Image (cartoon, helix red, strand yellow):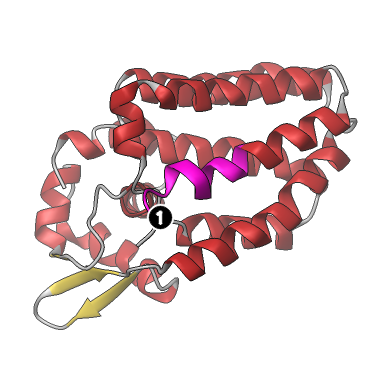
Amino acid sequence: MTTRSISGFARLQKRESLRDAVGNALRAAIVSGAMTPGEVYSAPTLGGMLGVSPTPVREAMLDLVREGMVQALPNKGYRVTEISDTDLDAITDVRLLLEPPVIRQITPLVPEDAFPGLRELAEGIVAAVAESDLVAYIESDRVFHLSLLEYADNPVLNSLVSDLRSRTRLLGLTPLLESGELQKSAAEHHELLDLIEARDADGAAALMERHIGHVRSEWAGPRQ
């Protein structure tokens, strides 16, 4: 993983504790493929890339080990867990069962005064693509979608969706970024807000279904 691949860390850190910011940056790096499946990383190396000491990295890695995203290797570091195509298919199927219906449910519930903040989050996704920062893209995308789902007032749902997103691997994002196709996907977040703001519940749910479909059809990369 290069220093450039986690350049969004300083921006992400502003709204979180150091441990949480490190953990979320590492989750995003794993999901995006910036941290390679099967490769071993040491806490000092990761700390150097993030500009922090190894201590918050080790603390964050305890969470990632519990989540199954990495394996701890005594005296070596942490190996990024590999996810099979079968698992990716199952994760996508569950997200399709959960998220589009919830988007339909919350469309009439999002208050008007919430849209400026949601627009700012959506613009953060667009900006991350413009800066070719996949780690910031993944983390900004996570925050945007979980912020929307909060209007369902169901913490269990948010926790489940957050876990499913962390277990996804989007190794196809780099070629999409290089081709310019990822800009279209980033713009979908503003389109989703347009539909919600127009109180078009069916349209918002349909867009959310297509958006999740990208995860498996394009963003995850070629099937093995």
The relative height of residue 175 versus residue 223 in the rendered view (above or below) is above
The relative height of residue 203 versus residue 48 in the rendered view (above or below) is above
**Direction from residue 85 to residue 120 in the image, left or right:** right
Q: Residue furthest bottom?
A: 74
Magenta region includes residue 171: no
Residue 167, percent from left and from top: 47, 62
Q: Residues within 10 Å of mark 1 (few under 14, many from 20)?
A: many
Residue 97, percent from left and from top: 75, 57
Camera-side residue: 66 or 21?
66
The relative height of residue 220 versus residue 134 in the rendered view (above or below) is below
SS at mark 1 in the image = loop
**Residue range of the region highlighted in magenta in the rendering:** 211-222
Predominant SS of the magenta segment: helix
Q: Do we see residue 102 in this rendering? A: yes
Residue beneath disc 1: 169
Q: Residue at x 24, y 33 (%)?
A: 7
Amino acid at pointer 1 = Arg
Residue 52, percent from left and from top: 18, 47
Quarter of the image for residue 81 reads bottom left
Q: Residue at x 41, y 47 (%)?
A: 17
Residue 119, percent from left and from top: 62, 19
Quarter of the image for residue 95 reads bottom right
**Direction from residue 87 to residue 207 in the image, left or right:** right
